[in-house]
Image (cartoon, coloured by chain):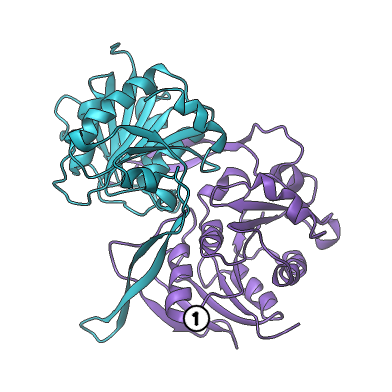
Chain colours: A purple, B cyan
Amino acid sequence: MSKDKLILVTNDDGVSAKGIHALAEVASRFGKVVVVAPDKPQSGMGHAITINHPLRLNKIDLFGEIEAYSCSGTPVDCVKLAIYEVLHRKPDLILSGVNHGENSSTNVLYSGTMSAAIEGAMEGISSIGFSLADYEPDADFSATKYYAALLIDKALNLEFSKGVCLNVNVPKLNQSEIKGFKICKQAHAFWADRFDKRLDQFGRTYFWLTGDFSDVDKRPDTDLHALKEGYISVVPTLYDLTAYNEITHFENWKL
Amino acid sequence: MSKDKLILVTNDDGVSAKGIHALAEVASRFGKVVVVAPDKPQSGMGHAITINHPLRLNKIDLFGEIEAYSCSGTPVDCVKLAIYEVLHRKPDLILSGVNHGENSSTNVLYSGTMSAAIEGAMEGISSIGFSLADYEPDADFSATKYYAALLIDKALNLEFSKGVCLNVNVPKLNQSEIKGFKICKQAHAFWADRFDKRLDQFGRTYFWLTGDFSDVDKRPDTDLHALKEGYISVVPTLYDLTAYNEITHFENWKL
């Protein structure tokens, strides 16, 4: 594999998360990797950008031989700063994640991991967001790394449709239990939101978001359905979200 | 007009902004209004939600007779809290804005104003985001109020397509200069991002997002094109963003 490919790696869990180290390591087998990622967890930040105050960018030494920077902003800020102030060019590929926790279905809207990939698509750059269905800080990324390598190889050699990025979710299974990739549609599933409502030590009310996820989508070709069946879901995602017309295009990749 | 309609009003500029007061006043002509809006500016927050710390909600007295609350979270947090902890039911209509500044084209992805409306659509509630192409704190909302009343009346009496909300942008013109509403598609226009890079008082570098907006979309039926021609743009917006199949549905409203 050519080493002249330039790959930007970011995430929303921050530079300390195990998932981004796993992804940067895999990416480094395919080209020159630069990491620009949040200096703190930014989960749930969606497509937020920082406009009312300045951003900081610091070179860090957490990724061995890999050039890396921490940024005080959101995942989308990281992509913008990386392109315009660190790389000074568009990379060949943007990889976001590996997120600690699933970003399937409508969670794509809340996900900082996926918003970084969507921002990449807006810039016309091939972009993939990876998430593992395991929220633990010490989650096992070995199966994800195996499959990420297969997909990155394809992504560097095949064309993305204009304005489309990929939302990849890996089930919490051993490598031998995973049945492979499946190109899917974003499920129409929703959080039945509720809040923990409690009193703090001063007797004042606070609310903390929680909820139950409800999959009301009975179609057999959704990402949630694929994950339940032991597949890695791959959803072609537009900034006009699910790219229904591109399903066939990515199926033809024969992942 | 029946007063038994329940209308939730929110925004991303915060409870002090002139735009939300204009919108709440118009809405109150059509039903019972409850305001739940951020306690500080939340522009550019996109679809961010607050998951890592608790939220506060305070009853406030800034809207005269109208029941109102400030919330420490994002616009999407406000919608969730309003439904599940304030109203304890789904309102008949969610109105977000009036934003101080345009949210046309791909800005819909960054916009807290529109993310509140999109969250409403995810909940199955008729929802509209309003923005005026004037960033000034003392912007003149009189034309916007006139046209918002016409649209709210329609919205309370006609059906929204499932999963669709409206992105309404008003040009900075006098009421007599505005040519009316036009149902449009979201323009494929992008920010050519750049950053102001400066040194702070300690000699450390900081970056501040700026940029030029570039409309590369030559189609005559985009929101940017309509605004340039003096129309109010109305884009039917999915959480799979532009709802191309619903353009006709909203044209049949004959706004």
User: What residue lies at 73% left-to-right and 67% top-to-bottom?
Assistant: A158
Note whether residue B19 is visible: yes
User: How far from the left and from the top, in percent, is residue B60?
Assistant: 19, 35
Horizontal side, residue A254 vs residue B46: left or right = right
Foreground residue, A221 or A102? A221
User: What residue lies at 84% left-to-right and 54% top-to-bottom?
Assistant: A179
Callout 1 secondary element: helix
Amino acid under label 1? Leu
Horizontal side, residue B67 vs residue B47: left or right = left
Toward which corner of the image does residue A209 lie, by quadrant?
top left
Toward which corner of the image does residue B79 lie, by quadrant?
top left
Note whether residue B50 is visible: no
Residue B226, placed above or below residue A86: above
User: How far from the left and from the top, in percent, is residue A160?
Assistant: 67, 62
Q: Quadrant of the N terminus of chain A?
A: bottom right
Q: Mark 1: give few (<14), some (14-19) or many (20+) Cα within 10 Å.
A: few
Foreground residue, A201 or B14? B14
Report which residue position mark 1 lands on.
A87
